[in-house]
Amino acid sequence: MITNTLELRMTPGGISPFTHVSQYETGARTFEFRLFDGNAEYPIPTGASVTLYGRRPDGVGFSTPCAVVGSKLLVAVSADMTACAGKVECELELVSGDTRVSTENFYLLVEQAAYRTGGS
C-alpha cells in the first residue's frame, strides 16, 4: 500500500496543498491527513464522521468517507477521484452532532494516463 500524507489547516487561506496521483488509479494508494489549527494539531472530536468531498475537472462531484484512526484521517483512492485527468479540488468535512467544520481546500493533481483513453 502506498501512502501520501498531507497536513491540512482548519482555517482557509494561503497556498493550498496538493498531491499527485495517476489517472484511473484505484485501491493501491491511501491518503493520510493530519489536521492543524495554527501550529497545534486539531483534535478530532470523538465520534465525528469525516468525508472527503471533491469536484473533478469534468464537473462531476464525489464524496468518500474517511476512517478516523487516532489523530489521523485515512481514505483510499477511489475510481471517482481519478477518473478525469487534471486538478481536482477537494476538502474534508468533519461532522460531530450539530457541528460541521471543513478544512482548507487541497488539490489532487491527476496525471493523464499515457496508455489508454478510458477507464476499465
Image (spheres, grey):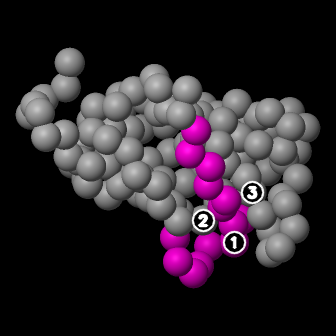
Q: Residue at x 31, y 41 (%)?
A: 22
Q: Is residue 61 visible?
A: no
How packed mark 1 is, by other alpha carbons closer than 10 Å (few <14, some 14-19, many 20 or more), is some
The reply to whether the C-beta atoms of the residues labelled 1 and 2 are less than 8 Å apart is: yes
Q: Nearer the viewer, residue 117 or 12?
A: 117
Q: Is residue 75 left or right of residue 60?
A: right
Image x and y of residue 39, in percent: 83, 73
**12 drawn magenta:** yes
How packed mark 3 is, by other alpha carbons closer than 10 Å (few <14, some 14-19, many 20 or more), is many
How packed mark 2 is, by other alpha carbons closer than 10 Å (few <14, some 14-19, many 20 or more), is some
**Amino acid type, label 2:** Glu
Residue at disc 1, secondary structure = loop
Of the numbered discs in the image, which one, if any, rests on residue 104? 2
Residue matched to label 1 = 11
Task: Name the image quarter holding the C terminus.
Answer: top left
What is the magenta range?
Answer: 3-16
**Please, is residue 74 above or below residue 112 in the view?**
above
Residue matched to label 3 = 35
**Amino acid type, label 3:** Leu
Q: Earlier in the sequence, mark 1 or mark 2?
A: 1
| Quarter of the view holding residue 95 | top right
Q: Earlier in the sequence, mark 1 or mark 3?
A: 1
Q: Earlier in the sequence, mark 2 or mark 3?
A: 3
Image x and y of residue 78, in percent: 43, 29
Q: Residue at x 26, y 54 (%)?
A: 86
Q: Is residue 90 left or right of residue 84?
A: right
**Amino acid type, label 1:** Thr
**77 drawn magenta:** no
